[in-house]
Image (cartoon, rainbow, N blue to C red):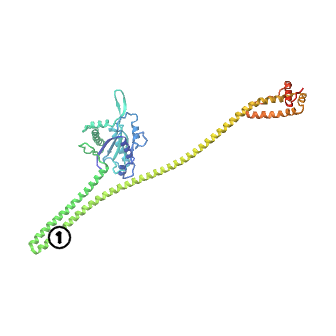
Amino acid sequence: MSNLVMARIRPLNGPLLVAAEQHGRRLDEAAIRRKVRDDPSLTWVPEGIEEDPLALSDRLADHVAGALVPKAKAKALHMLVKLPASVPVETEADARAALDLVVQFAQDTYGGRAVFSARMDRDERSLNSVDLFLAPRYLKVTKRKSQEAVSLTRFGKLLAKKRGIEDRSDSAKGSMQAQGSALQDELADWLTARGFEAQRGVAKNRDGDDWKTPEVMGARKDRAAIEQFIAEQLPEVMDKRAEADRLLADAARIKTEAEAVAEDTKRQAQIAADEAAAAIRAQAASDAETIRNGARAEADRLASEAVEDRERRLGEAERAVADDRTAVDADRRRVDLDMTDVRTRSAAIRVRDETLTRRETAVGRREKAVADQAGALAGLVERLEPLLSVVADAHARLQAAPAHVRQWLDGDGRVGAAVRTAGPIVKQATEALAKLVKRPKVAEPAPAEDLDLTMLAAARDARSGSKGK
């Protein structure tokens, strides 16, 4: 790891903010692909916030509450910082201090109230990257009032102006590139001022995005390692080739000397020289091929390991998705069973409601019939009461009459029997009617002095059929 630093900033709209939250929760494909260990991420939120630091939409809403927010597609800024080797990040305590250091840099650069969430991932190969999410607040002062407001471009433009970096393309994209270039200069100087060795990378001399993903950077490193391996083996190959050339020269010299000695030995020397040269060439070619094969095998091994690692991670992700799908299917089956039980109970309740409705209807009809009978009985009682009153009054008068009057009325014994029988019957009828309709009892018997003897005689004559004297 070198002391080069990097800082990149870009605006986030609503969907990009949601995607950043998914990446922070390690749920997207990039997070799964880059994972090499199980260490959890370190997070930061402003003091007083106790809710989930990875819920970026909620933390943004808390941060901008009460401030004037401009109507624009961009909702927040995402700043990515890569720290130099001079900032330790190996232990958790070192990483926590490094995270606080980068948050302080962002606050100092963007007005002091900019960062609403920050994260340092500890499960990737590189441990020196910090993700920060900003919505810079400031006091907006006009002629009429002062108000808290949020601006995603104010402090970046001020930083570019401070650094003397102009927008080459005079556009919104060019302005963001100028702000990013100024941010890199500011980060290197800020860290250097605090005692860390930090060096800014070579500035771009053209417009456009030159950001490379960790996967692309890893592939470039692998290719550089292979090229370095070949470069390290190449001098040995060249030495062997030089040795072969020297041996060839010796063979030529021996050939020349053999020709000078004798024609007969010339042929043998030529044969020996040719065989020696062929053997040397074959050996040199074999050695060169062995080296090339070794380099190729090493490259193939590295590529195979990369493919196997990716397939393993994909397999783990697929198994996790399959487990989640199985759990969802089980939940769905339980819900279906619960819905079936609810429908069965609802049907039973409807049957009971219909039965109760029929019973209530029958009870209503019975109550109406009873009410009709009670009304008819009340009318009958109203008609019988006067008659019973008259009979009771007559019975009372007969009971109070002198003995000679009762003997006179009881000529043949039938009137006396009627008088004796009428009393209990009238009393029973009166009591029964009183229980039914709760009416007053019939009148008490009249005193003897109030008896109308003429009326009694008329009653006696009506029963006997003869007029009394």
Under circle 1, the secondary element is: helix
Counting from the top left corner in percent of width and height, residue 445 is at 82, 28
User: Is 194 left, or right, of 345 in this rendering?
Assistant: left
Counting from the top left corner in percent of width and height, residue 99 is at 36, 44
Please state which amino acid type lies under the numbered disc 1: Glu
User: Is 434 left, or right, of 194 in this rendering?
Assistant: right
User: Is 282 left, or right, of 88 in this rendering?
Assistant: left
Residue 45, above or below 467: below
> Which residue is most to the bottom?
264
- Residue 459 placement: quadrant: top right
At a point 83% along the width and 33% down the height, the residue shown is: 422
Counting from the top left corner in percent of width and height, residue 208 is at 26, 43
Q: Does the rendering let one see residue 195?
A: no
User: Is 258 left, or right, of 286 in this rendering?
Assistant: left
Q: Which residue is mark 1?
A: 275
Question: Badge 1: few (under 14), some or many (20 or more) residues near its Cα, within 10 Å?
Answer: few
Residue 77, above or below 441: below
Counting from the top left corner in percent of width and height, residue 157 is at 29, 36
